[in-house]
Amino acid sequence: MVTAAVGASIAGSPAWLPLGAVGLGIYVAWRALTGEEIDTSIRNLALAIASNGGTSFRGSNLTDTNFAQARLNSTDFREATLTRSRFYQAEQLALARVEDSVLSHPALRTLLVTGNGRKKSYEGMNLNGVNLTGADLSSANFREADLLNATFCGANLEFANLT
């Protein structure tokens, strides 16, 4: 029945129209998954489809969990408690569902994966409970950021603004 409806809607259309629609869909999905700035709802839809069947930690307490060097594509971290969780050198975290978590901000996600926050600004951000063990945060700006329960063990905080 769905096939008939699709066939009927395409009948009478130029032959290139279905191919163009598929191409546009692939392009939008590619842009959404590479993290380029596009409509957030499109990105979330693309990630919902891509993460179907992946590991779900939705709403879980993952306090002190070590995800270092883990491949995290298709993983659902929505509404999870990630206090002191370690993401250093985790792979494909940009392809995980991270809404309603500290991972939802791309700059913070990059910091947690790379450990490099040198001369970067995290002004006003929610870093509550993040694990920045060993990170280079020299000359970083954390002005008015929420740093409650954050871990800075072995981090370089030289000239960092923590006001």
Image: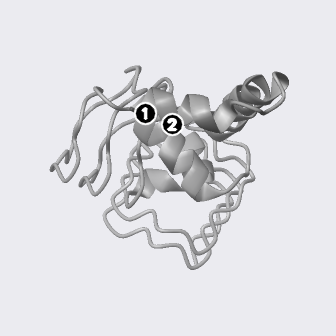
Q: Position of residue 66 (x, y in %)?
A: 27, 31
Q: Where is residue 133 in the image (x, y as percent from the top left)?
A: 42, 41
Question: Compared with residue 138, is residue 147 higher up or lower down, i.e. above or below?
Answer: below
Q: Which residue is drawn at 31% across and 64% down?
A: 149
Q: Can residue 156 be seen in this view?
A: no
Name of the residue lying farthest toward the left:
61
Q: In this view, does 103 lie to the left or right of 94?
A: left
Question: Compared with residue 121, is residue 163 higher up or lower down, i.e. above or below?
Answer: below
Residue 61, label in figure: none
Q: Mark 2 points at which residue?
A: 5
Residue 2, label in figure: 1
Q: Nearer the viewer, residue 120 or 14?
A: 14
Q: Nearer the viewer, residue 31 or 145?
A: 31
Quadrant containing the N terminus is top left
Question: Compared with residue 1, is residue 62 higher up or lower down, i.e. above or below?
Answer: below
Residue 7's image quarter?
top right
How many C-alpha atoms fall within 10 Å of the one at disc 1: few (<14), some, or many (≥20)?
few
Q: What residue type is labelled 1?
A: Val
Q: Nearer the viewer, residue 42 or 116?
A: 42
Q: Where is residue 51 in the image (x, y as percent from the top left)?
A: 38, 32
Label 2 with label 1: CB-CB less than 8 Å = yes
Q: Position of residue 142 (x, y in %)?
A: 60, 67
Q: Which residue is drawn at 37% across and 65% down?
A: 128
Q: Nearer the viewer, residue 10 or 158?
A: 10
